[in-house]
Image (cartoon, helix red, strand yellow):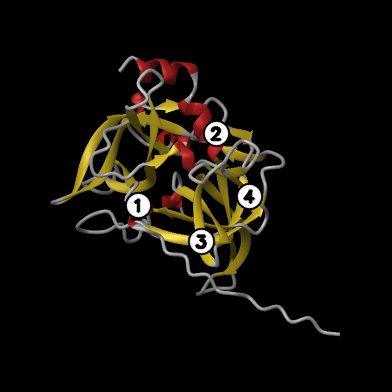
Amino acid sequence: MSLLFVWRVKMVRVTDHFLGCIAFLCVEDLEQTTPSPKGTAFAVSVTDGNRPDVAHCYLITARHNLELARTDSIIVRVNSEEGFRDLVTDRNQWQKHDSADVACLPFSSERLEQIPLAYFVGADYPYHFRFSEGGENFPVRVGTESFFVGLFVQQPGRGGNLPIARFGHVSRMPTEPVVLTSGDGTPFEQLAYLVECRSWGGHSGSPAFCIFHRTYAGEPLKHIAFLGLVSGHYDIPTAVKSRNSEERFMAAVNSGIAIVTPAESVRDLLFREDVVRERNSS
């Protein structure tokens, strides 16, 4: 007896809102005269604890992007009417998570779309869709469709930031810690999703999203939630033979498995006591 599986193809369209929340992080390079994009950051909005009608914008990135910079000057490149603007920040201005690969900086919302906290996947990995009556929970599972948006270092864009989107699926839930490396080479452990989606160096700090499909009143609907941020990927050591000799050397081949720090770690930093105190006093 054979089983026939029929798959209904669901087109995923990444709207301007998700592309427009992206900024590129540039650092000084000894081999270049102008700062070059090296990593990704994105904007989120947080409601003021004392003034519910006021929202604060934060720029979020991977902590190791700051730690690996050669100088304290971290340049945030955002799109503008003229192409792009380079805004200089100091590495010491950024707040860093104590135990996860996350950093944040209060930032002007000019020219950047923002991801509201309502889009965040929760601590137990469901997304609560609050905009329907009573709300609905959509659990993240192995196989949940995902994508992330960020810098393609080989072609960042000449006249402005041109982020790319990459697509995949959740391969493993954050059931146990994975080992990451801080900027000084020190290993540390944190919970993370593993996502079947190729990540490159410039994708560090990219926002990762998950997609939930459902049908309501006979119409197909999609809900997109913030899953977390890209912290790296796994390489496979592979022996490669030199083109001009029989000599072999080891090369790192991208495994196609990205490491995604959960959204809850971003929320943890945004609601850390000192960050909240600074936000409410501004």
Q: Residue furthest bottom?
A: 1
Examine the image and state in which quarter residue 61 appears.
Answer: top left
Quote the CA–CA distance across marks 1 and 4.
22 Å
Lower position in the chain sequence, tag 3 or tag 4: 4
Residue at numbered disc 1: 17
Which quadrant is home to the C terminus? top left
Please identify, in this view, whether the residue under mark 3 or under mark 4 is nearer the observer.
3
Q: Are marks 1 and 4 in contact (CB under 8 Å)?
A: no
Residue type at mark 1: give it. His
Residue type at mark 3: give it. Leu
Quote the CA–CA distance across marks 3 and 4.
17 Å
- Report whether 162 appears left or right of 1: left
Examine the image and state in which quarter residue 113 appears.
Answer: top left
Q: Position of residue 213 (x, y in %)?
A: 56, 60
Quote the CA–CA distance across marks 1 and 3.
18 Å
Residue at numbered disc 3: 221
154 to 33, vertically: above or below: below
Mark 4 surroundings within 10 Å by alpha-carbon count, few (fewer than 14), some (14 through 19), many (20 or more) = many
Lower position in the chain sequence, tag 1 or tag 4: 1
Lower position in the chain sequence, tag 2 or tag 4: 4
* SS assignment at label 3: strand
Residue at numbered disc 4: 140
